Image: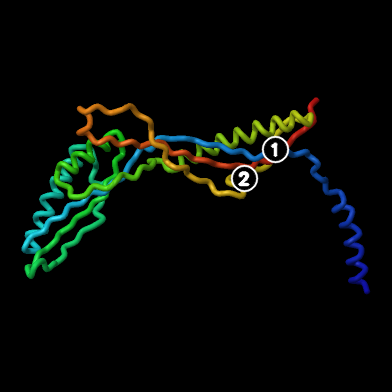
Amino acid sequence: MRPLLALAFFVLLAAPAAAQTPVDTTPTIVADGIGTATLVPDIADFTAGVERIAPTSSGARKAANRRMAAVFRVLKAGGIAEADIRTVGLSVRRERVKKKIRYRAQQVIRVRVRSVSKLASLLDGVASAGADAVDEPDFGFADPSAGRLLATRAALADARRRADDAAAVVGMRITGVRTVSLDPDSQSYEGDAVPASGGGSSDSASAVTRVEAGTQQFSERVRVVYTAAPLT
């Protein structure tokens, strides 16, 4: 019987303490913000390959090596570091053509260009050096998070403008930030690349490959819970 009385006494003591817990009645305003940022890509990747055919495996490989060495010389002269060149394909295949045995040697490299302004001359140089295939470049960013950061800042500014306006309409003012949610109920995305505009090319420039990096648009969304107070 005594344990039950002790428990009842503890409950009676705890109840007033729980009842005294203050309730936060601070007014809040929740605002979503959307921001975008548009950047010009500052790096590019492209692949280049060579292919040689000879009666012997050794002959095909040596011919492919010589052709690829010429490609490497162009890349080095263009300021491409060895660390930015990666072999992505290397093969020697035995084939029968009209009852004759031939060997086909292939080499493919992927090149990262850290100065997009050099891309056009590098593509032309690689092709002139004897590359049998040069694929279209893929554009990107040395800092892949830069666009998202700028878009997020724009979204936060947008949310604050909306919150300030809403608060003023109802006779209040923003006093602080309670929480910030990034990408609420949605996924951030990178917009489609937009080609950069440029003037027409003359006949004298037609021999030079023209490469346009365009722009890339980033969009971010945030949700901010602000604290508010009546205007005084």
Q: Report the quarter where the C terminus lies.
A: top right
Left or right: 199, with 95 as reference point: right
Snapshot quadrant of residue 112: top left
- The mark nearer the N terminus, 2 or 1, is 2
Q: Residue at x 58, y 49 (%)?
A: 186
**Residue 28 location in percent, x, y?**
74, 39
Query: Residue 181 — which label?
Result: 2
Furthest residue in direction top, as rendered: 232
190 vs 207: above or below: below
Residue placed most toward the observer, 149 or 62: 62
Q: Position of residue 180 (x, y in %)?
A: 63, 42
- Amino acid type for the residue under numbered disc 1: Tyr
Q: Looking at this view, is 68 or 174 the one in front?
A: 68
Q: Which residue is mark 1?
A: 226
> In the image, is 210 to the left or to the right of 34?
left
Q: Position of residue 223 (x, y in %)?
A: 64, 42
Residue at 22% from the left image edge and 39% from the top image edge = 122
Q: Amino acid at mark 2?
A: Ser
Q: Is residue 169 above or below residue 220?
A: above
The picture quadrant where one finds residue 2 is bottom right
In the displayed structure image, the side of residue 31 where residue 64 appears, left or right: left
At label 2, counting other C-alpha atoms closer than 10 Å, the crowd grade (few under 14, some 14-19, many 20 or more) is: few
Where residue 77 appears, as percent x and y from the top left, is: 18, 37
Residue 171 lies in quadrant: top right
